[in-house]
Image (spheres, helix red, strand yellow):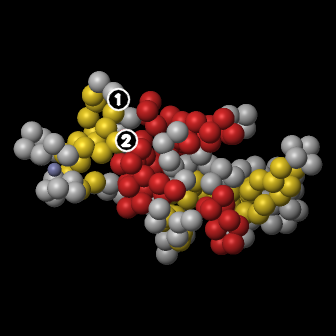
Amino acid sequence: MGYIHLSEDGTRIFVDRPSGFLLEGEHERYLAMAQETFCPPAEKTLKKSSGLPADLICPEGGGTMVLRRGAYGVFFGCGRFPRCWCTLPLVEGTCQLLQINGMALYTVSRPCWKCGQTLRVRSYFPYFDLIQWLPGVEEPLQPLEAIRLSILPQLDAYLEQHCENIAERYSKTAGFSYTANLCPRCDMLQGS
Ligand SMILES: [Zn+2]
Ligand SMILES: [Zn+2]
């Protein structure tokens, strides 16, 4: 299990081994799990932490890895090509980017639907982080759209400990536990 910590201002989550939960082929599983409930947030209402540079450095010569499109899809290749032929699969490169830059913790303030108390609803969306850093790869990264609160157990457990309104709840109707935002005043679920 990876080591996780929030940045000082609490807006970014760093994970030392993101590949542990973003293995190739697992995107589809996350997608299947979340397909029923995932609803893309309205981007305007999201308060993002500042975007970060996301350069991947070539392991062989210090060049910057850039996105290329080949016969088998999108991959990272050394910017010094053809002097350097180093490449990196897309999944591995995106995992490294999250490792370097962390994952933004998105926050939106809104009233509790039940009691009206203003509260902060938080979640993470690696997909939004990555397409912001890597314009043009929306399509190959699309399965990541499904990844948000309640999908990555390690991050959820961490956020439950560090964010006052995030907690695990058991759903009798669904028959499983999930992590969600709760109202601090009336304890009502505010969704994931
Ligand atoms: Zn290189
Ligand atoms: Zn409430």
Answer above or below: position of 84 versus 181: above
Q: Are marks 2 and 1 in contact (CB under 8 Å)?
A: yes
Task: Residue 8: give x, y in percent of width and height.
Answer: 49, 75
Q: Nearer the viewer, residue 182 or 168?
A: 168
Tell me the residue that label 2 is attached to.
Answer: 90
- Tell me the amino acid under the disc marked 2: Leu
Residue lying farthest left?
83
**How many marks are shown on the rendered structure?**
2
Q: 102 or 108: which is nearer to us?
A: 102
Where residue 93 appears, as percent x and y from the top left, is: 36, 48
| Residue 56 x, y percent position in the rendering | 28, 54
From the viewer's perspective, tell me whether residue 132 is left or right of residue 38.
left
Q: Is residue 13 left or right of residue 152?
A: left
Which residue is the extreme one toward the right? Answer: 172
Q: Residue at x 17, y 56 (%)?
A: 60
Disc 2/disc 1 C-alpha distance (Å): 9 Å
Quadrant where the N terminus sits is bottom right
Q: Residues within 10 Å of mark 2 (few under 14, many from 20)?
A: many
Q: Locate residue 138 relative to residue 105 in the image: left or right.
A: left
Q: Is residue 107 visible?
A: yes
Identify the disc placed on residue 73.
1
